Image: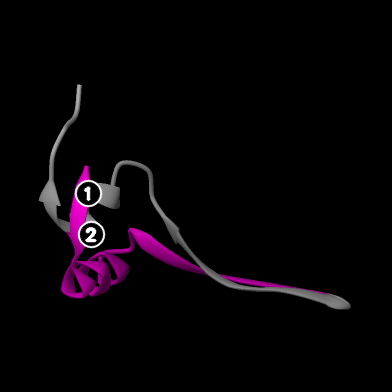
Amino acid sequence: MLQKFNFEGFLRELENGNVLVDFDARTGHNHGTKFRLRQNCLHKLYEQVKVIL
C-alpha cells in the first residue's frame, strides 16, 4: 500500500533518471505528455510503503 505521495521524491527520481518524460505527439493526433517510471521505483515516490500479503 502506498500512501502520501512525496513530490520531493518525484523530483529526486526525475534527477536520478528513474522518471522519464514522454512527449507523445503524433502527426494529426496528440496523445499528450506522460511521465514514465522505471520498474521497481514506484515505492520511492511515497512516504509510507506497506506490503500487504
Say whether residue 26 is left or right of residue 15: right
Queried whether the magenta region covers residue 7, the answer comes back as yes
Quarter-of-image position of residue 17: bottom left
Give 6 or 41, whichever is nearer the viewer.
6
Q: What separation in Å lies between label 2 and label 1 (alpha carbons)?
A: 9 Å
Instruction: Give the amino acid type for the residue marked by disc 2 in the picture.
Output: Leu
Query: Pointer 2: residues within 10 angstroms few (<14), some, or many (20+)?
Result: many
Give me the disc on residue 2: 1
Look at the image and tell me in which quarter the N terminus lies.
top left
Q: Position of residue 36 (x, y in %)?
A: 46, 59
Quarter-of-image position of residue 47: bottom left
Q: Position of residue 2 (x, y in %)?
A: 22, 49
| Residue located at (16% from left, 32% from top) | 51
Residue range in magenta is 1-26
Q: Earlier in the sequence, mark 2 or mark 1?
A: 1
Q: Position of residue 22 (x, y in %)?
A: 56, 68
Query: Pointer 1: residues within 10 angstroms few (<14), some, or many (20+)?
Result: some
